Image (tube, rainbow, N blue to C red):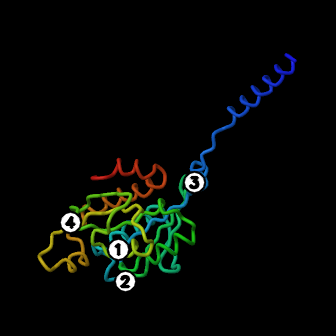
Amino acid sequence: MLKWISDIFSSKQKEDTTDCMKPEVHEHQKNNIKNVSNKFLIVGLGNIGAEYVNTRHNIGFKILDHFAKKEQLSFQTVKLGALAEYKFKGRTFFLLKPNTYMNLSGKAVQYWMDKENIPLENIMAITDDLNLSFGTIRIKPKGSDGGHNGLKNINLILNTNQYTRFRFGISDEFKKGKQVDYVLGDWDDAEKTALPERLETAYEIIKSFGTAGLENTMTTFNGK
């Protein structure tokens, strides 16, 4: 009788021990692993056409052109834009210059995001910003469109503002009523002299975003 009770107790202890040793499963952790992507969509905002090439409003295009030149990449005409592909440290960067004009940029972003299965957190939109002094950099994980028509359309089409935006300051040195002429105007001589160094910094930011992550990139480059 005592042996029978002892056997039952011993068996129960083994069952309890086995249960305690089972690994704890967190579904959200498992899902996060599945959602990790090494693809990044870097969208430079601007307007197509030779008359816009060197305008302040086209800094997004200019930054991606500088990146492509540094890495000897070629842009190919594709659906809704021009695209260059860059591979670095196991990551693939898709550099996109939408050909939809600024106020319809979201259509191109959504198309290439879906086509390449790129998660929202791996998208960076590069824009000009009147509220920042020339060359000042501001990287944020989300935010309002700030009156920028390109961001406004991306927010509308994607139905979210939860994507990284890289704002490049162009200052607001224009007379009342001359904002459109200013943003669609050419850089002045002082800005042209300073641009190469700023473009080089922008090049490093894009690479950092894909390799070091957003938080580290903001810490390293914001305000510089």
Residue situated in front as seen by the camera: 65 or 95? 95
Name the spot of residue 62 as percent of width and height, x first.
36, 69
Label located before the other in sequence (1 or 3): 3
- Viewed as shown, does residue 112 lie left or right of 56? right
Q: Looking at the picture, which amino acid does disc 1 mark?
A: Lys
Give the residue pinned by disc 1. Answer: 152
- The residue tagged with tag 4: helix, strand or loop? loop
Label located before the other in sequence (1 or 4): 1
Q: Looking at the picture, which amino acid does disc 2 mark?
A: Gly
Q: CA distance from mark 3 to mark 2?
A: 34 Å
Cβ–Cβ under 8 Å for marks 4 and 3 = no
Give the residue pinned by disc 3. Answer: 90
Q: CA distance from mark 1 to mark 3?
A: 32 Å
Name the spot of residue 107 as percent of width and height, x first.
46, 78
Picture residue at 34% right of the left edge, 61% below the top: 199
Residue situated in front as seen by the camera: 146 or 183? 146
Structural crowding at the residue carrying mark 2, measured as other residues with C-alpha within 10 Å and reported as few (<14), some (14–19) or many (≥20): few
